[in-house]
Amino acid sequence: MSEEHIFILTNGQKIPVIINNRRGAHNVTLRPKIGKNPEIHISKPWMTSTSFVLKFLESKRKWVEKVFDAAPQKEEIKPGMTIEFLGRNVKLMHDGGLRGNCYTNEEKTILCIGGGADMFERRVRDFVKEELLQEIKIIIKTTPREYWPRHITLRDTSSRWGSCSATGNVSFSWRLAFAPYEVMRYVVMHELSHRKHMDHSKEFWANVSELYGFGVERAKRWLSQNGQSLQRYF
Ligand SMILES: [Zn+2]
């Protein structure tokens, strides 16, 4: 059984609060859920009153506000807007009469998306993913063959930018498409280096530098400082 309340942030945003009684719970736990539909989940021992829980939540307001403030705001993808991906600023246009999508200029700075208007955002996302995959393949081809993975997968992960399995499959967060090109290239070289070193040893980092070239530290730093910004769309 759960009950629902509303928590109003200082900026006026209304966040649903879902309170659950937990069998065997000894204290009240608070979990702000960020994302498209933000919520605050609270579990409490059944004996604890709702008014106590709401007071407790109020006492934690500063922290809760901080969590939601830090959460990236999603920006809606609309025709006419310009987004940056793969190091290029691309203006997005919509043409319902078009079946596919295509760049309308040689510089690839104007992208025309076909299909229904309701599919616009999704088609842009699929297009960006496909372009990223092609770009990753091009980068991989610049390395010696022994680094080439068996299989490449794109995922939607916010905590890991890439991974490499012992069997030689690599995966990347498709959101790297929104990172500076060199940062994305660094993640590719990082994962490829795991084809030789499955750890983060000195030898591993030497290998990354060998593949990537100068500036590994800068790319790493960019990701740790700005990684969250890659979540701003979709
Ligand atoms: Zn690693």
Image (spheres, rainbow, N blue to C red):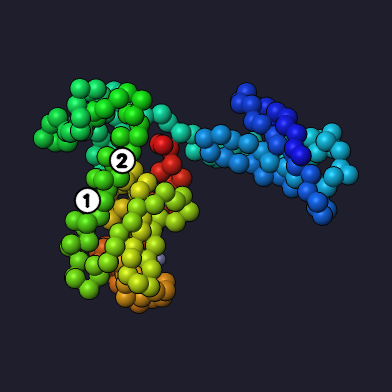
Q: Which picture quadrant has residue 41?
A: top right
Reading the chain from its start, which is encountered first: label 2 or label 1? 2
Instruction: Determine whether the beta carbon of the residue marked 2 sits less than 8 angstroms from the nearest atom of ligand 1.
Output: no
Does residue 164 appear in this view? yes
Q: Which mark's residue is nearer the viewer, 2 or 1? A: 2
Image spot of residue 199 (x, y percent): 42, 74
- The residue at the point 24 percent across, 67 percent down is 148
Q: Which mark is residue 134?
A: 1
Image spot of residue 49 (x, y percent): 86, 38
Instruction: Determine whether the beta carbon of the residue marked 1 sits less than 8 angstroms from the nearest atom of ligand 1.
Output: no
Q: Relative to 117, does residue 139 appear above or below in the rendering?
A: below
Q: Amino acid at mark 1?
A: Gln
Q: Quarter holding the N terminus?
A: top right
Residue 20 as seen in the image, left or right of residue 168: right
Q: Residue furthest right?
A: 47
Q: Relative to 157, does residue 33 appear above or below in the rendering?
A: above
Disc 2 packing (10 Å; few <14; some 14–19; many ≥20)? few
Q: Which mark is residue 126?
A: 2
**Could you tell me which secondary element the residue under label 2 belongs to?**
helix
Disc 1 packing (10 Å; few <14; some 14–19; many ≥20)? few
- The residue at the point 24 percent across, 39 percent down is 88
Image spot of residue 180 (x, y percent): 31, 47
- The residue at the point 42 percent across, 72 percent down is 200
Residue 134 as seen in the image, left or right of residue 41: left
Q: Relative to 160, does residue 86 appear above or below in the rendering?
A: above
